[in-house]
Amino acid sequence: MDAEIVEALRAGDEATFAMLVAQYGASMLRVAQMYVRTRAVAEEVVQDAWLGVLRGIGSFEGRSSLKTWIFRILTNTAKTRGERESRSVPFSALEGADDEPAVEPDRFQPEGRWAGHWAAPPTPWSDQPENRLLGAEARHVVEKAISELPPAQATVITMRDVEGFSAEEVCNVLALSESNQRVLLHRARSKVRRALEDYLGED
Amino acid sequence: MKLARDLTCIELVELVTEYLEGGLSAAERERFEEHLGFCDWCVTYLDQMRQTLATVGTLREDDLSPALQNTLLEAFRGWKAG
């Protein structure tokens, strides 16, 4: 299927280009915003990335999927632009210390027969007023929590859980090992859950 | 009754992503689910994580602004003419 799309793009078929833009454009814009400061710059990155796609399509060999290839061009373009903005991030490194627990350790029993079991357990969110989790405020809480994550964590959770990439696609685009991808995703998801818990716990 | 005491809650919360990703071995998964069988709090935690993912998913936007779409189409035409 990729082969047909690549062929049409090489032949200058505008409908194919428009289809790809519709399919990936919004995801590209969101991912680009992980690397640069403003939405305006992210839009420029998306434009430059598409030009890179068009310039490179003639020599695309299909060793990765077209999607992976497009997003690699995007992230490389965004990275270069971010470095110019002196916002470069050491990306492949696992950020932060290893001891970054999913839940604050003081919420568990420190000792005794029930050591390591909940001392301050989570309360079910199903008791929340209807749709509170899917409302604009909750979305805002999540967006803010993601924006405060270290860049690699923010990018991984954005690609996986907002834009619906598979783990394999994220590993290929960002050149991460499977285990690093999972650690970054785990830390990111844990912190976003915590932010929602804090939000829902306020009255 | 013998409880499955070998996995604690503090350990379980660190395995949640691997569990949801299908990355646990069969034995680890069994241990994980055994714990859920007697620990409602960890069931709640796992539910919260699933609800978190559902909320994160609502951030998705499907379309670029028409202005940006037009800019991209013009760039395409320029490349084609080019």
Image (cartoon, grey):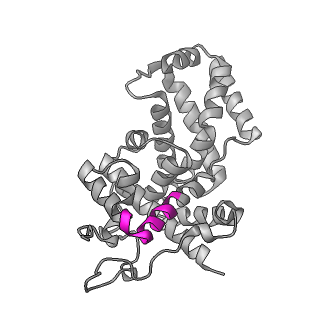
Note whether B8 is above or below A78 in the view shown. Answer: below
**Which residue is rendered at x = 76% and y = 39% of the image?**
B67
**Which residue is rendered at x = 68% and y = 21% of the image?**
A15
**Membership of B45 in magenta stretch:** yes
Image location of residue B35, percent across then percent down: 33, 65
Note whether A122 is above or below A184 in the view shown. Answer: below
Note whether A108 is above or below A131 in the view shown. Answer: below
**Membership of A175 in magenta stretch:** no
List the single residue furthest toward the front. Answer: B1
Which quadrant would residue A139 be assigned to in this image?
bottom right
Which quadrant would residue A121 be assigned to in this image?
bottom left
Note whether A48 is above or below A152 in the view shown. Answer: above
Which span of residues is magenta-colored? B36-50
Image location of residue A137, percent across then percent down: 69, 66
Please state, as top left, top right, bottom left or bottom right, where the N terminus of chain B lies in the image: bottom left
* A4 left or right of A176 in image: right
* A157 left or right of A181 in image: right
Question: Does the rendering let one see residue B13?
Answer: no
